[in-house]
Image: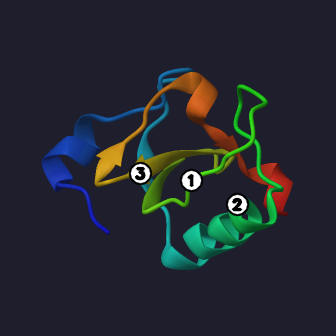
């Protein structure tokens, strides 16, 4: 999974305006394992039910925005707090 470099350069967290970068495959796998167990919630406090194709991680490493069908979902409530998988 990759995002065009020009697109990645202009994307930012919609909440804090921090830059984002591609999440590594190990993190995406951990998140997808949590999705499969039903143990992952987004910032809107709703269960994440769809597997992630990838993710964009905020510069402070606290929030991941999911990528589904090669489209980054850059909505505040869809962000996934990463402390859930620590």
Q: Are marks 1 and 2 in contact (CB under 8 Å)?
A: yes
Name the quarter where the N terminus is drawn: bottom left
Disc 1 element = loop
Q: Who's the residue at 57% across and 24% down the image?
A: 76
Q: Which residue is mark 2?
A: 35
Q: Position of residue 28 (x, y in %)?
A: 56, 68
Q: Position of residue 37 (x, y in %)?
A: 80, 66
Disc 3 element = strand
Q: Which residue is mark 1?
A: 50
Judge left or right: residue 52 versus residue 42.
left
Q: CA distance from mark 1 to mark 3?
A: 11 Å
Q: Nearer the viewer, residue 26 or 48?
A: 48
Residue 54 vertical position relative to residue 68 in the rendered view, above or below: below
Q: Callout 3 environment at 10 Å: few (<14), some (14 to 19), or many (20+)?
A: many
Q: Which residue is mark 3?
A: 67
Q: CA distance from mark 3 to mark 2?
A: 14 Å
């Amino acid at each position: 999974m990759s995002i065009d470099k020009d697109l990645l350069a202009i994307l930012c967290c919609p909440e804090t305006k921090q830059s984002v970068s591609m999440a590594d495959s190990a993190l995406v796998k951990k998140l997808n394992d949590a999705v499969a167990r039903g143990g992952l919630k987004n910032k809107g406090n709703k269960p994440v039910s769809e597997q992630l194709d990838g993710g964009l991680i905020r510069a402070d490493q606290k929030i991941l925005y999911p990528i589904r069908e090669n489209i980054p979902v850059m909505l505040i409530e869809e962000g996934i707090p990463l402390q859930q998988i620590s």
